[in-house]
Image (cartoon, rainbow, N blue to C red):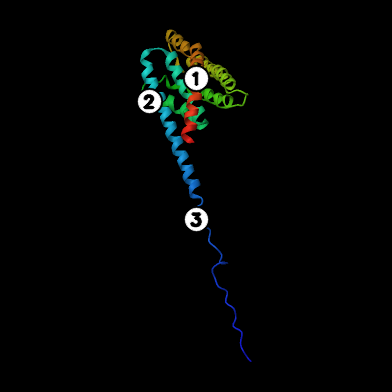
């Protein structure tokens, strides 16, 4: 018999080079975009809240109350929302306050920003360290951040800005110098103590909401 064997045909289908299924990277992008929106929202809320509290407390004429509230919100922002949020609030809030007419001289604002950033950085890096007890880290952050911010403001404003940039009359220079000396240490400590009292409750509420 001269039967011809039929050549076998490879049925396409199972071994076809498959195309990578699109869409796997979308959830990552969506999650990243969502985190960015949350970060922007929280930063805006803390900035607005800080300016609102400054506006509300400034008419009282008590820099201890106003300063303590400002420091409290800076600490809460960095300890609950992260370093980027805290630094953003520390930088933007003095500028926005000046535009709204409740800030000091423009030549002082860079030193205010530097003081705020010093407070935020030390609270973030010291307050989040593992020292066996969270309150030990908080107290270390409280003291180091308050002293460091006080020194930044005192050296920057009292020793540099007032005599070099402002050229104020002696009586006014004394008033401004007094505002940015020991009261700044008191407000940083007061705001920090209030933050230590509030942070455990705030962090627990945030964890429960995320969970």
**Vertical order, 20 against 71 (above or below):** below
Would you say residue 154 is visible in this rendering? yes
* Residue under the image location 44 percent in, 10 percent down: 175
State the SS at label 2. Answer: helix
Which of the 4 image quadrants contains residue 166? top left
Is residue 200 rendered to the left or right of residue 54? right
Q: Which residue is mark 3?
A: 22
- Closer to the camera, 100 or 136? 136
Which of the 4 image quadrants contains residue 125? top right
Residue 82 is marked as: none
User: Distance from label 3 to label 2 (Cα)?
Assistant: 48 Å
**Vertical order, 121 against 183 (above or below):** below
**Vertical order, 198 against 83 (above or below):** above
- Closer to the camera, 130 or 51? 130
Residue extending furthest front? Answer: 1
What percent of the width, then of the height, locates residue 52? 38, 23
What percent of the width, then of the height, locates residue 79? 51, 27
User: Distance from label 1 to label 3 (Cα)?
Assistant: 49 Å
* Residue under the image location 47 percent in, 29 percent down: 205
User: Distance from label 2 to label 1 (Cα)?
Assistant: 32 Å
Residue extending furthest top? Answer: 171
Q: Quadrant of the N terminus?
A: bottom right
- Closer to the camera, 121 or 2? 2
Of the two numbered discs 3 and 2 on the same chain, state the one appearing first in sequence: 3
Do tag 1 and tag 3 residues touch (Cβ < 8 Å)? no
What percent of the width, then of the height, locates residue 206? 47, 31
Residue 197 is marked as: 1
Question: How many C-alpha atoms fall within 10 Å of the one at disc 3: few (<14), some, or many (≥20)?
Answer: few
Q: Which residue is mark 2?
A: 99
Question: How many C-alpha atoms fall within 10 Å of the one at disc 2: few (<14), some, or many (≥20)?
Answer: few
- Closer to the camera, 5 or 110? 5
Would you say residue 86 is visible in this rendering? no
């Amino acid at each position: 018999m001269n039967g011809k064997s039929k050549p076998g045909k490879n049925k396409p289908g199972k071994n076809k080079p498959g195309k990578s299924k699109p869409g796997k990277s979308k959830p990552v992008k969506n999650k990243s975009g969502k985190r960015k929106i949350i970060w922007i929202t929280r930063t805006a809320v803390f900035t607005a809240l800080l300016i609102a509290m400054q506006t509300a407390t400034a008419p009282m004429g008590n820099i201890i109350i106003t300063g303590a509230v400002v420091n409290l919100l800076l600490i809460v922002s960095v300890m609950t929302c992260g370093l980027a949020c805290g630094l953003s609030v520390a930088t933007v809030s003095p500028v926005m306050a000046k535009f709204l007419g409740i800030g000091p001289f423009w030549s002082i604002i860079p030193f205010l920003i530097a003081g705020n950033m010093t407070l935020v950085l030390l609270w973030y890096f010291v307050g989040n360290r593992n020292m066996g007890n969270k309150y030990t880290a908080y107290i270390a952050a409280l003291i180091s951040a308050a002293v460091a911010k006080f020194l930044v403001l005192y050296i920057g404003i009292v020793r540099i800005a007032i005599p070099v940039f402002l050229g104020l009359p002696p009586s006014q220079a004394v008033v401004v110098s007094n505002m940015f000396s020991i009261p700044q240490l008191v407000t940083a400590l007061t705001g920090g103590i209030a933050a230590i009292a509030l942070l455990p409750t705030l962090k627990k509420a945030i964890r429960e909401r995320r969970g």
